[in-house]
Image (tube, rainbow, N blue to C red):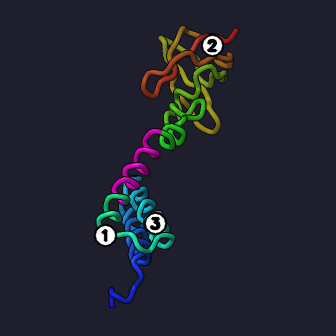
Amino acid sequence: MLGQIATHYLWWILALLLIAGEVMAPGYFLLWIGIAAAAMGVLLWLFPGMGLLAQAVLFAVLALAACLAYARWLRPRIERRAPGSDRLNRRAEQMIGQRYELIEPIVNGRGKVRVGDGQWLVSGPDLPLGITVEVVAVDGTTLKVRAAA
């Protein structure tokens, strides 16, 4: 049966298997080898008389080129971070520079502010209830504040 299948179809089947493997265990590695196998299928479709050794060498070169192209060109562009994304999952750090109203006065260095529908602990100089404060730093889940100018 395999003798009746054109060799370029075998390369395309290998490409599909490699890309399916990438879907099952993502890591961007099998994808590029799968793309090289698909390219090999196209080349063999265009040049059907290519020998087995030439196919193997050309596939190795294409796979290496595809992996290097990903590592050197595509990956740095994908990994560019949007401004502020370094604090994406650190909500307290996103509050630095924001202003909030005290819902509990700061006494002995401790108080509370309302943020949205929640409350956050704050530390800073003693300040009366209702004054607006600015977040200047974060210490765990406590916001360090000062009186807003």
Q: Which residue is mark 3?
A: 38
Q: Magenta span covers which residues?
A: 59-72
**Which x, y percent locates residue 83?**
60, 30
Q: Which residue is mark 2?
A: 128
First in sequence, mark 2 or 1: give its number: 1
How many C-alpha atoms fall within 10 Å of the one at disc 2: few (<14), some, or many (≥20)?
Answer: some
Q: Is residue 66 left or right of residue 99?
A: left
Who's the residue at 43% across and 78% down the image? Answer: 9
Which residue is more in the foreground, 13 or 108?
13
Quadrant of residue 84 within the rendered picture: top right
Marks 3/2: CA distance?
70 Å
Which residue is more in the foreground, 122 or 25?
25
Image quadrant holding the N terminus, namely bottom left
**Residue type indicated by callout 2:** Pro
**Residue type indicated by callout 1:** Leu
Mark 3 or mark 2, whichever is nearer to me: 3
First in sequence, mark 3 or 2: give its number: 3
Name the mark on residue 52: 1
Q: Is residue 127 left or right of residue 71?
A: right
**Which x, y percent locates residue 136?**
56, 15
Marks 1/3: CA distance?
16 Å
**Residue type indicated by callout 3:** Ala
Who's the residue at 41% across and 49% down the image? Answer: 65
First in sequence, mark 1 or 3: give its number: 3
The residue sitting at the left extreme is 53
Which residue is more in the foreground, 125 or 9?
9
Who's the residue at 49% across and 37% down the image? Answer: 76
Marks 2 and 1 close (CB-CB < 8 Å): no
How many C-alpha atoms fall within 10 Å of the one at disc 3: few (<14), some, or many (≥20)?
Answer: many
Marks 3 and 2 close (CB-CB < 8 Å): no
Secondary structure of residue under mark 1: helix
